[in-house]
Amino acid sequence: MARFRVVATGGTFDEIHAGHIALLRKAFEVGEKVIIGVSSDAFAWKNKGKKLNHSFEQRVESLKKAIEAEFGDVDYVIAKLDNDFGPAVISGDVGALVASSETQSKGKLLNEIRAERGLNPVEVIAVSLVKAEDGLPISSTRIRAGEIDRQGRLLKDSRSRLNNS
């Protein structure tokens, strides 16, 4: 049973992977409706230094397909993020922020901004990073580099590099 009417979560979602699915699973578990922020191309590059494989439009389309495949008919909206918080800063409806354990500290800043705007604080719900076979977190960066696949399995090239080192 959902604990919140509306929750927010977000990311770049360049290569949809098991960590993204875990984040979304928690968001859909605790929220009736989920606002999913997707970093704009400019924000991902300028503020995070990310070299993306896919455009914003391609990332949104892949995200929609992954949500349908994993969760079926769920209530969500996708918002373009040009900053860290997007609609979570201005929407009084948002009751919780679902973030990775890596980014949960941004919840404190979010609540400070919301307080300045006269909005109630959100509950910050942290989701542990999903680890790959090698014990390191699964990330789009590692997938782009050819180290792991979307499930965190080491790819043959990276296994041989590990064995030869």
Image (cartoon, grey):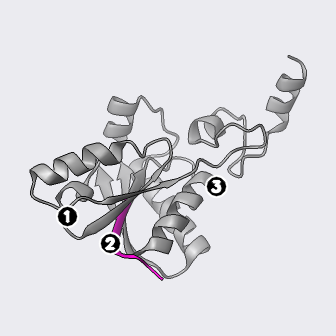
Quadrant the C terminus occupies: top right
Residue 83 can be seen, yes or no: no
Q: Kindly report the distance in space between the C-alpha atoms of the residues bearing marks 2 and 1.
A: 10 Å
Whether tag 2 and tag 1 are in contact, CB under 8 A, the answer is yes
* Residue 83's disc number: none
Along the polypeptide, which appears first: circle 2 or circle 1? Answer: 2
Residue occupying the point 40% across, 54% down: 10
Name the side, left or right, on which 133 lies relative to 84: right
Amino acid, disc 2: Val
Residue 13 appears at what percent x and percent y? 49, 50
Amino acid, disc 1: Ser
Instruction: Tell me the quarter of the picture where residue 132 sits.
Output: top right
Reading the image, the residue beneath label 2 is: 6
Amino acid, disc 3: Ala
Along the polypeptide, which appears first: circle 3 or circle 1? Answer: 3
Residue occupying the point 72% across, 40% down: 148
> Which residue range is magenta in the image?
1-8
Label 2: element kind? strand
